[in-house]
Amino acid sequence: MKSALQKSPIPKHHAYLARMLKEPVFDPQWHFHSEHQLFLVLKGSGTRFIGDSVKSYIAGDITFIGPDLPHLWRSENEEEQEMNIAWSEGIVIYFHKDFLGKNLLQSNEAIRLRNVFHKSLRGIEFTHKTAATLKTMMIDLVAMTGFDGVLQLLKILNFISTTNEFNLLASAGYTNTLREADTERMFKVYAFVMKNFKQKIFLTDLAKLTNMTPTSFSRYFKQHANKPFSDFVSEIRIGHACKLLIEKKMNVSQACYQSGYQTLSNFNKQFKHITKLTPLAYKKKYEIY
């Protein structure tokens, strides 16, 4: 496996990097880097991991991630991606927060920009009209070069610093405690859960995978994921159920049993705990949009 800590993707003597992605998968592994990252999904769906946030993603998903915040976009089409045919498309923009110089960033005029950079340390997802406008602005940036691109990036940053149509992702108490070896180990755990969440998962299997005892694994996972392993599995299952309810138009019972739950009562309980809505209410709310 490649090193989880990437070198800077921004070419030397450039203020930023904006490029189109057309790959079987967006991220080969759980990783983090020193740059800020704006990311737009144009094609593909799956599960998005940012810090201790676990949510599904679809086309149109836009996020802003601060430095050293671990992340991973995992495609749901695992078998196809192994054959190199499940293509995912998106736009990624990398830049350092002081790409315009530290003096400007510390000025009174840049107070909103400093605030949005601070929020990005938890990860931000943009919603509603903001996401639609931002999508167009990011697509335009990819085609620009020279100082025109810098001005467009500034327009984007100014735009997102004024909107209230966003959600913060990682919890307020989240801190990145991962080392390089930890990112590889956590990636193995995530990959195992994504492949097996529709059936009962035993701690002994994860302990064996990570060369730990079940007790040590539970403690290790909670330390690095900021949540118990059982909560993480529930988030994966409920995220999958949300997609089945909306994208596949399944009824609640079908979504329940195809997401790894054995009883409707437990499914309903976990669904409301994670989404704050019942499965039916969630479906009706989503269908409004």
Image: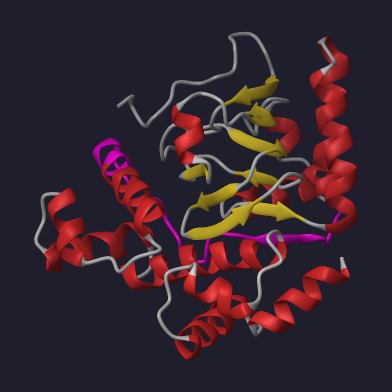
* Chain part drawn in magenta: 162-184
| Magenta highlight on residue 163 | yes
- Relative image position of residue 21 (x, y in whole percent): 65, 24
x and y, in percent, of residue 167 in the image = 70, 62
Q: Which residue is drawn at 63% across and 46% down?
A: 45
Q: Which of 100 and 269 is in front in this view?
A: 269
Residue at 80% over, 76% down: 285
- Asked which quadrant contains residue 96, the reply is top right
Say which quadrant the C terminus sits in: bottom right
**Of 78 and 73, which appears nearest the observer?**
78
Q: Does 70 appear above or below 93?
A: below
Q: Tell me, yes or no, if residue 155 can be seen here.
A: no
Residue located at (29% from left, 39% from top): 184
> What's the residue at 88%, 16% (across, down)?
148
Res 221 → quadrant: bottom left
Direction from residue 107 to residue 84 in the image, left or right: left
Please name whichever residue, 113 or 218, is drawn nearer the observer in this view of the structure.
Answer: 218
> What secondary structure prevails in the magenta region?
loop
**Quadrant of the drawing holding the N terminus:** top left
Instruction: Tell me, yes or no, whether the highlighted magenta stretch contains residue 42.
Output: no
Q: In which quarter of the image is residue 145?
A: top right
Left or right: 155 as drawn, with respect to 90: right
Residue 15 place in picture, x, y as percent: 69, 18
Q: Please tell me whether residue 4 is drawn above or below residue 113 in the rendered image.
A: above
Comparing 19 with 275, the one in front is 275
Asked if residue 100 shows in the view, the reply is yes
Scheme of image coloration: secondary structure
Spot occupied by residue 44 in the image (x, y as percentages of width and height): 65, 40
Q: Is residue 227 left or right of residue 162?
A: left
